[in-house]
Image: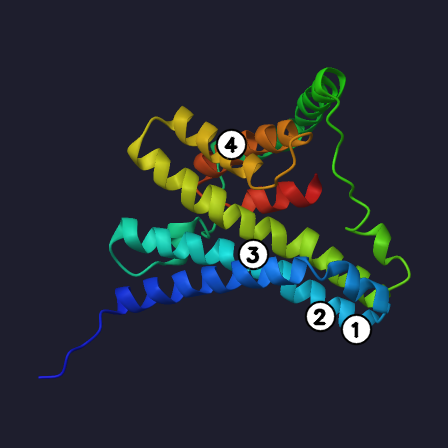
């Protein structure tokens, strides 16, 4: 009788390898960013951005899929990651309205946090020039960056931090702990101390929204609006 490999094991190994490959690709390409940009080749730069930043988001999704597979002990479905349709009722509608109207509060928290760090510890914010303004003269690269920031990033971040981390924690621990832990991991994952207050506050709002609506789709929309 032939040995049959468990589909669960195959998926787990594949996701782990994808995460490792994505991490290594990101590390290798990040060191070459200035070299590629100095070539001023729009197509090459666009491909570089897709591979470099895409590797990070592929790693995020692979972690979520592998983690859900291990914890659920069965094949991962889109529902395990919060990718489900919303049942619209009074609760979900008010949750969405609350998330959108909380944006000013998030900005206030962000301003207080960054101002405190800069005033007391002279910590300066990271330069955001490389995100968009750097590619003003490279239209293809600029459009690729906009796609990554406004489309790919919100979806992958929601899948990992709200769809996987927050939902799994909420099933095992108090909801407050699930919200705070997932928001803190979300903030830490951006490696930006000065803007950590904004990411922490945003993470709290998005985690509550995901738990109250049962879906990460509203969170993706809120991030786009923000």
- Residue tagged by mark 4? 184
How many marks overall? 4
Q: CA distance from mark 4 to mark 1?
A: 37 Å
Query: Helix, strand or loop at disc 3?
Result: helix
Which residue sits at x=44%, y=36%? 211
Mark 3 = which residue?
Answer: 57
The quarter of the image holding the N terminus is bottom left
Question: Do tag 1 and tag 2 residues touch (Cβ < 8 Å)?
Answer: yes
Cα distance between the residues tagged 1 and 2: 6 Å
Q: Which mark is residue 43?
A: 1
Position of 13 relative to 89 (above/below): below
Kindly indicate the quadrant of the structure image that contains residue 75: bottom left
Residue visible at 89% across and 57% down in the picture: 136
Q: Position of residue 137 (x, y in %)?
A: 91, 61
As helix, strand or loop, the secondary structure at mark 1 comes to helix
> First in sequence: mark 1 or mark 3?
1
Count neighbours of disc 2 (C-alpha within 10 A) and say few if under 14, some if 14 to 19, many if 20 or more: few
User: Which percent across, then down, holds residue 202?
Assistant: 60, 32
* Residue 5 relative to residue 195: left or right: left
User: In the displayed structure, would residue 23 be above or below residue 220?
Assistant: below
Characterize the local packing of mark 1: few (<14), some (14-19) or many (20 or more) Cα atoms within 10 angstroms: few
Q: Nearer the viewer, residue 129 or 24?
A: 24
Give the residue furthest to the right.
Answer: 137
Q: Residue 130: image x %, image y %?
A: 79, 51
Spatial CA distance of label 1 from label 3 is 21 Å
């Amino acid at each position: 009788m032939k040995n049959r490999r468990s589909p669960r094991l195959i998926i787990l190994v594949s996701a782990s390898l994808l995460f490792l490959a994505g991490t290594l690709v990101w590390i290798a390409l990040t060191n070459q960013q200035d070299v590629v940009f100095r070539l001023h080749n729009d197509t090459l730069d666009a491909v570089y951005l897709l591979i470099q930043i895409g590797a990070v988001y592929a790693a995020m999704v692979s972690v979520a899929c592998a983690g859900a597979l291990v914890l659920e002990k069965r094949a991962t479905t889109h529902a395990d990651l919060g990718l489900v349709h919303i049942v619209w009722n009074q609760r979900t509608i008010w949750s969405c309205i609350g998330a959108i109207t909380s944006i000013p509060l998030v900005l206030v928290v962000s301003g207080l946090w960054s101002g405190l760090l800069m005033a007391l510890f002279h910590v300066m914010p990271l330069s955001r020039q490389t995100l968009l303004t750097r590619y003003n003269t490279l239209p293809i690269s600029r459009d690729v960056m906009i796609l990554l920031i406004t489309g790919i990033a919100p979806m992958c971040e929601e899948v990992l931090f709200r769809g996987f981390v927050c939902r799994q924690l909420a099933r095992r621990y108090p909801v407050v702990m699930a919200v705070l832990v997932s928001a803190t991991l979300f903030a830490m994952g951006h490696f930006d101390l000065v803007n950590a207050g904004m990411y922490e506050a945003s993470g709290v709002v998005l985690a509550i929204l995901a738990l109250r609506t049962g879906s990460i789709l509203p969170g993706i929309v809120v991030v786009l609006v923000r």
